[in-house]
Image (cartoon, rainbow, N blue to C red):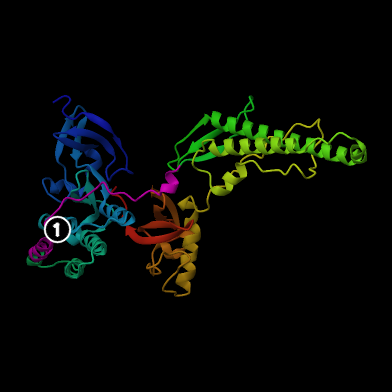
């Protein structure tokens, strides 16, 4: 039927396991892939399965056929890492839903395939939060499920639940386990809490300091005015001229010129008074009072100070900068060395541009962290505080323990103080499995907060 599968947009391999086109399908969406590209795919045998990815429909076109597949949006492993990074562990009901879904998927693989242990792939979540095992690159279904159950156990402190999960993980590492155990485990988990849909809208928090706007001076334009650029850490910058900055600069220049002029006048009067002191004593007329220039200078300085304090600030200046911007009081009753009258008064110092904080880019810190971990591994140290966060043990193997030369780092997500980085092995490393690092910035220094293996996306 024309228009039944309206094209929404294209999706690539970075957005899911299947590159293709996202199309409307019934009340939701599906990924449309050329059937020829899936000719050798094992998922054809699992159409209609609840927790194994299979073809949900076939669309006929003039030159062939397209397969419609569920839209898988994120790996389960990445989902667990994001929840940990956001310090939002799975609720008890979510934990039961996810674990039971994994068990049922393994059972579906064992019922329709020669052995679930022979199935290769990885676990993904659909857009509505349903776990699906997707055939392809990754690992053995039972081994991958066992590893995920162990990671899920990190989201709870309930001892009874942890005992059940440990028993499940140990049984899944074998090639088979008794079907009665699945029913017993499901009953034990759902006895603790009722099943609950997975929350997919949890992200790692942003630092308030990173969201606050910063002002960075730009070069002077033809008109002599300065512009400031407001830049947030979301890397969306917008530059616009600031009339307030130009007015503040002009006010500071005027105040300094007035104070310098008063200082020169006072110095001149002081010298003149020394030369004609004797003549003034002989003069019968009383000498002119020096209180008037002092009162005038004090009044002007007070006015300038009050105007400077009342002038609106952008809210981002610290106390040191605020003190630097204020007018400096000058005692007019002391000699002050001033510039020649022909020189232009100083326009005041330009604002100091602070360099970006060290460690702002998590990718730049990855090589150093990996080399530090190698040193800790060689020293057989249980902890590595220079590279690993508190509570993270020194890894015994994997790409993290081989140094920066054994892998290439790719930024997956950046949440401000928390970042997720993927390590892909190089040819010289001899490794095939990728690893995911969860980095956390503490006191302007990046540390590894979590390490876990991640499977390749299906081909």
| Front residue of 454 and 318 | 318
Relative vertical location of residue 159 with respect to residue 304 in this rendering, above or below: below
- Left/right placement of residue 156 relative to residue 301 reads left
Q: Quadrant of the N terminus?
A: top left
Extreme-front residue of the structure: 284
Measuring 46% from the left and 64% from the top, which residue is drawn there? Answer: 387
Boundaries of the magenta span: 183-212
Q: Quadrant of residue 258?
A: top right
Measuring 74% from the left and 41% from the top, which residue is drawn there? Answer: 332
Residue to which mark 1 is pinned? 100
Relative vertical location of residue 434 with respect to residue 33 in this rendering, above or below: below
Q: Residues within 10 Å of mark 1 (few under 14, many from 20)?
A: many
Measuring 92% from the left and 41% from the top, which residue is drawn there? Answer: 278
Measuring 14% from the left and 41% from the top, which residue is drawn there? Answer: 56
**Would residue 354 be visible to someone looking at this image?**
no
- Look at the image and say whether residue 207 sits in the magenta stretch: yes
Question: Residue 312: x percent and y percent?
Answer: 51, 36
Question: Residue 388: x percent and y percent?
Answer: 43, 64
- Left/right placement of residue 424 relative to residue 183 reads right
Question: Residue 194: x percent and y percent?
Answer: 11, 57
Relative vertical location of residue 179 with respect to residue 265 in this rendering, above or below: below
């Amino acid at each position: 039927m024309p228009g039944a599968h309206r094209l929404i947009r294209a999706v690539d391999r970075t957005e899911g396991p299947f590159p293709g086109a996202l199309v409307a399908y019934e009340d939701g969406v599906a990924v449309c892939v050329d059937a020829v590209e899936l000719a050798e795919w094992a998922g054809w045998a699992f159409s209609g399965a609840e927790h194994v990815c299979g073809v949900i429909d076939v669309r006929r076109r003039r030159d062939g056929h397209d397969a419609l597949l569920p839209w898988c949006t994120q790996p389960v492993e990445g989902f667990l890492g994001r929840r940990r990074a956001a310090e939002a562990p799975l609720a008890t009901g979510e934990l039961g839903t996810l674990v039971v879904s994994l068990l049922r998927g393994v059972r579906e693989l064992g019922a329709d395939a020669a052995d679930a242990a022979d199935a290769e792939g990885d676990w993904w979540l659909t857009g509505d939060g349903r776990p699906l095992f997707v055939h392809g690159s990754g690992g053995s279904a039972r081994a991958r499920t066992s590893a995920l159950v162990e990671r899920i156990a990190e989201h709870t402190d309930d001892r009874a639940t942890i005992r059940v999960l440990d028993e499940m993980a140990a049984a899944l590492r074998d090639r088979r386990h008794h079907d009665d155990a699945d029913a017993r485990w499901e009953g034990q988990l759902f006895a603790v809490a009722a099943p609950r849909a997975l929350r997919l809208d949890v992200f790692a928090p942003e630092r308030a300091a990173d969201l606050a706007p910063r002002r960075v001076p730009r070069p002077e334009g033809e008109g002599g005015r300065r512009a400031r650029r407001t830049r947030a850490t979301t890397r969306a910058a917008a530059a616009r001229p600031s009339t307030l900055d130009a007015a503040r600069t002009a006010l500071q220049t005027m105040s300094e010129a007035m104070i310098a002029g008063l200082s020169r006048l006072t110095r001149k009067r002081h010298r003149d008074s020394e030369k004609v002191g004797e003549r003034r004593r002989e003069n019968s007329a009383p000498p002119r009072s020096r209180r008037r220039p002092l009162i005038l200078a004090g009044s002007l300085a007070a006015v300038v100070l009050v105007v400077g304090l009342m002038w609106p600030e952008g809210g981002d200046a610290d106390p040191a900068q605020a003190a630097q911007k204020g007018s400096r009081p000058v005692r007019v009753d002391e000699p002050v060395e001033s510039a020649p009258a022909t020189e232009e008064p100083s326009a005041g110092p330009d604002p100091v541009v602070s360099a970006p904080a060290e460690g702002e880019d998590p990718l730049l810190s990855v090589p150093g962290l990996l080399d530090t971990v190698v040193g800790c591994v060689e020293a057989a140290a249980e902890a590595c505080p220079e590279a690993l966060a508190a509570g993270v043990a020194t890894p015994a193997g994997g790409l993290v323990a081989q140094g920066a030369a054994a892998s290439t780092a790719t930024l997956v997500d950046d949440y401000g103080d928390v970042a997720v980085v993927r390590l892909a092995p190089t040819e010289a490393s001899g490794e095939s499995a990728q690893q995911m690092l969860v980095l956390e910035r503490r006191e302007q220094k990046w540390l590894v907060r979590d390490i876990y293996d991640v499977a390749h996306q299906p081909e």
